[in-house]
Amino acid sequence: MNNKGLFSIIVVAIIIVVVLLFGSRFVKTVAPGYVSVASLFGKVVETPFNAGLHIPVNPLYQWHDFDVRSDTITETASVPSQDQLQTRMDVSVKFRLNAEETPNTLQRFGDKTRLVTYQLIPSLRSRLREAGKTIHRAEDFFLEETQNRLQIQLLADLRTSLDEKGLIIEEVLIRSIDLPPFIMKAIEAKKEREQEVEKQKAELERFKTEAMQLVAQAEAERLAAEEEAMKLRVLADAKAYEIEKVNKAIAGNQAYIQLQALKALEKIAEDPAAKIYFMDGNSPMPLPLLHMGEMGQK
C-alpha cells in the first residue's frame, strides 16, 4: 500500500469519525411554540431559528431554546394608598416572548427565566406601588371603577417598559384584594347596617301595603253598607207607601170597616165573661167598648 492510499484511508476514517461524532449537530429541529438562538464562542447569532427542521447548521453552534407561547405569572404585593394603608393584591400578567427579539434578549438579559425574574416581576411590583399612590383610600380598591383603571394603567406601563426587552404584555388582571383587617371589619359592619336598613324599608313597604289593603277593604265594606241601607230605605219607603194606600182605601170604604168591626165582635162574643157596650147606638156604625168583668172592676 503506497502513501497515497494510506492517506485516503485516513481521510475517510476521519470523515467517518466526524460524521459519527458531529453528524446530528448538522441538523437542528425546533419544536412548535419555540424559537432557538445560536451562539458561537460567546457571540450570539442575530437571526433566530423558528420552529421546524434546519439543515445544515454549524455543528459548533450552542443552542438556546426559548418558549414563545403565551404564559402567565401571578405576583402578590402590598400596595400603599394615599392614606398610608397597605393593601395586599394578587395580580396576574399574561405575556409572551417576542420571537424576533430573542437574540437581543439572550444577549442583554439571558434566558426566559432570568427575564421574568429580573425584569418582569420587579417592574410589576414597582408599577403596582406607583399605581397605588393614585388611590385616595384603601377601601377604594374594592370599587369596580378603580380596579378597571388600575388594570388599564398597569397594562400600559408594563408594555412601555418591557417591550424593548423582548416581552409582549397581553393582559393584566387583578385576582384578589385583601384590605387591612380593621377596614374589612368596618366594611362588613357597614354592609350589615345597610342590610338592616333595607330590611326595615321592606318591612315598612309591607306595612304600607297591608294598610292600603285594609283601607280598600273598609271602603268596600262602607260602600256595601251604604248600598244595603239604601236598599232597606227603598223597601221601607215602599212599605210605607203601601200602608198609606191601604189606609186611604180603608178610610174611603165604610163597608170594609163594618165588616172588620163585626169580625172583632164575633171574637169578643166567644168569651162568656166579656160585656159589650155600644157608644152612640144611633150611629150607622156604633163603636163597641169591651169591658172585661174583673178587669173592669179594678
Image: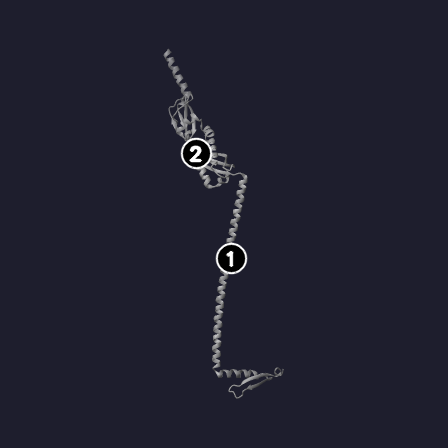
Residue 211 appears in the rendering = yes
- Residue furthest toward the left? 4
Query: Secondary structure beneath disc 1?
Result: helix
Give percent across and percent down for residue 14: 40, 17
Which quadrant does the N terminus fall into? top left
Give percent across and percent down for residue 241: 47, 75
Q: Within 10 angstroms of label 2, few (less than 14), some, or many (20 or more) residues?
A: some
Residue 38, picture quadrant: top left
Question: Which residue type does callout 2 highlight?
Answer: Asp
Residue located at (49% from left, 70% from top): 233
Residue 150, picture quadrant: top left
Q: Is residue 5 left or right of residue 236?
A: left
From the viewer's side, name the closer residue of 219 and 172.
Answer: 219
- Kindly identify which residue carries mark 2: 157
- Residue furthest toward the bottom? 282
Query: Secondary structure beneath disc 2?
Result: helix
Give percent across and percent down for residue 291: 59, 83
Structural distance between the alpha carbons of marks 2 and 1: 60 Å
Give percent across and percent down for residue 89: 50, 36
Q: Is residue 184 left or right of residue 298?
A: left
- Kindly identify which residue carries mark 1: 211
Q: Is residue 270 left or right of residue 60?
A: right
Question: Which residue type does callout 1 highlight?
Answer: Ala
Vertically, is 206 above or below 178? below
Residue located at (48% from left, 72% from top): 237
Which quadrant does the C terminus fall into? bottom right
Q: Within 10 angstroms of label 1, few (less than 14), some, or many (20 or more) residues?
A: few
First in sequence: mark 2 vs mark 1: 2
